[in-house]
Image (spheres, rainbow, N blue to C red):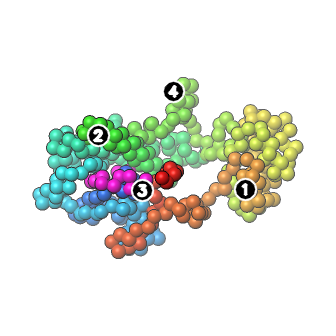
Amino acid sequence: MQEVFQGLKVIDLSSVLAGPSVGMFFAELGAHVIKIENPKQGGDVTRSWKTSAEQEGSISAYWSSINYKKEILFLNLSEFTDRDKLDQLLSDADILLTNFKSGDAFKFHLEPLELYKKYPSLIQASIYGFSSNQDRVAYDVVVQAETGFMFMNGDTHSAPTKMPVALMDVLAAHHLKEAILIALYNRLKTGKGKILSCSLERAGISSLVNQASNYLMSGVIAQRAGSLHPNIAPYGEIISSADNKQIVLAVGSDRQFTTLCHILGIPELANDNRFASNQQRVANRILLLEKLQEKAEEINAAQLMSAFIEQDVPAGLIKDMSDVLDAAIAQEMIREEIIEGQQTRRITSIAFEDLTPLS
């Protein structure tokens, strides 16, 4: 499976996160991905997006995270000789990735319809910000704001909050990957390429799923409620252990609640009229959390989690980045590469597993 796209040639003219992550997906699965950056602008802007912990002169972790296994070329498309080199690369390319600002496709003589005439089997795939206004510059936090995510994300008393990853970029990239895979399948049957695009705005709206239907069918506008579920308790409640670790609960049935109470040493709570049913627990969730916390803080997290997992009580230890990435499953997903003489590391973009038995 790792070499399924061997022989496929991808020209990646995109920058920042969404487009380059599409390119990396194909690179990890065997495609020859050539990422082109403008030397006049210092390359992809994410080369300069560094945390305060990164050393001056190092390759940025942000850039490294989505440019694994690519061939990097520096071409200034405003110059004739470099633009001619791009035409040579496109002459036998399978996929072209772009995320041009408005007007740049015309400026660089890369108008999609003209390219389609010149390279009819080429699959052109572009990402941009807003479908409602294609001239508008968009970054992830702006689109999170305008697609409803920031409004409903955060604690009851907090300001609207963005997700701590560029979620709109990630979602748009996945949608564009799907579109390209469909186009590759179509090309097998017709020999023809496609002109594809996906905006961060459309990807965000498409991903509202049940929250969108809550409004469309019932007029309910999702409000900030932290991690609490409006219909289930204790679901989203966080308890702290004796060793000061935090565990989030996701108890969705009376049986699970009864088991939770037994693990915490308060079996009588499951029969308390205030908590005997889910609806009663939702109505009295503040008092319920107080009683659960009173017992949880007497037990270490490892003991609690062991009992929860063994007895099928849905709960999760709240982990920081070191907890997550030091674990065995994450270690299996780390990929390393020497780029420009420097060691780089990132998480693979391939989350699925090929379980087909070897013949």
Which amino acid lies under the numbered mark 2 shown in the image of this protein?
Arg
Q: Quadrant of residue 7?
A: bottom left
Label 2 vs 1, first from the N-terminus: 2
As drawn, 48 above or below 280: below
Element at label 3: loop
Label 3 vs 4, first from the N-terminus: 3
Element at label 4: helix
Q: Are marks 4 and 2 in contact (CB under 8 Å)?
A: no
Which amino acid lies under the numbered mark 4 shown in the image of this protein?
Leu
x 46%, y 54%: residue: 350
Q: Nearer the viewer, mark 3 or mark 1?
A: 3
Q: Quickly name the residue at label 1.
A: 305
Looking at the image, residue 60 sits to the left or right of residue 232; the answer is: left
Looking at the image, residue 16 sits to the left or right of residue 195; the answer is: right
Q: Quickly name the residue at label 3.
A: 2
Q: Which residues are magenta?
A: 1-20
Element at label 1: helix
Q: CA distance from mark 4 to mark 2?
A: 37 Å
Residue closer to the observer: 179 or 260: 179
Q: Nearer the viewer, mark 3 or mark 4?
A: 3
Q: Quickly name the residue at label 4.
A: 216
